[in-house]
Image (cartoon, grey):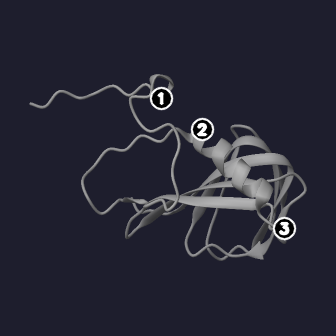
Amino acid sequence: MKKQEAHDFRHGSITTSFERPYRPVDLNTSLTKAFPLVSMAEKLMEEATSATSGRAALTLARGDELTILLTAMKSEVTLEEHSAPAAATVILLSGNIIFTTSNDKITLAQGDSVTFTADIPHSVHASEDSAFLIVIGGSS
């Protein structure tokens, strides 16, 4: 049996961020992958700072049934109303965002999340510099 390795992001045993172009992990293959989300989000925030849109995103992993994205948005930036291609969950890693639908206005703080179905048009506003995961799709 192969010995499993423990990964310590602080001691550099795996990549501590990412380089462009970034190739998403293929979830259609058998694997285990760790992500240093804090350092990746910090680098994305640097990209968002220089982007005219005030945001930057990175697809971390993609498969037939699931996509995972890491997104950074500068303070006071709004992602205009849109719909997800499938049911999704937004998990706020840092900052503060307002998730708005026609029926709800939900303020998310660090560690909060919201789940919604594909038929829900929504917008996202960053009240401060923010980083979040978006998990789209999946099946049981």
Tell me what residue is drawn at x 62 percent, y 68 percent: 117
Q: Secondary structure at mark 1?
A: helix
Contact between marks 3 and 2 (CB within 8 A): the answer is no
Contact between marks 1 and 2 (CB within 8 A): the answer is yes
Tell me what residue is drawn at x 47 percent, y 29 percent: 9
> On residue 9, which mark appears?
1
Tell me what residue is drawn at x 82 percent, y 53 percent: 74
Q: Check the picture and name the quadrant holding the C terminus.
A: bottom left
Cα separation between marks 3 and 1: 41 Å
Closer to the camera in the image, 107 or 47: 47
Cα separation between marks 1 and 2: 9 Å
Tell me what residue is drawn at x 84 percent, y 64 percent: 78
Cα separation between marks 3 and 2: 35 Å
Compared with 119, 87 (above or below) is: above
x%, y% of residue 136? 54, 63
Identify the amino acid type marked 3. Asn
Q: Check the picture and name the quadrant holding the N terminus.
A: top left
The image quadrant that residue 81 belongs to is: bottom right
Compared with 53, 127 (above or below) is: above
Q: Secondary structure at mark 3?
A: loop
x%, y% of residue 120? 70, 73
Label 2, on which residue?
39
**Residue 107 horizontal side relative to residue 26, left or right:** right
**Of pointers 1 and 2, the one earlier in the residue sequence:** 1
**Of pointers 3 and 2, the one earlier in the residue sequence:** 2
> On residue 103, which mark appears?
3
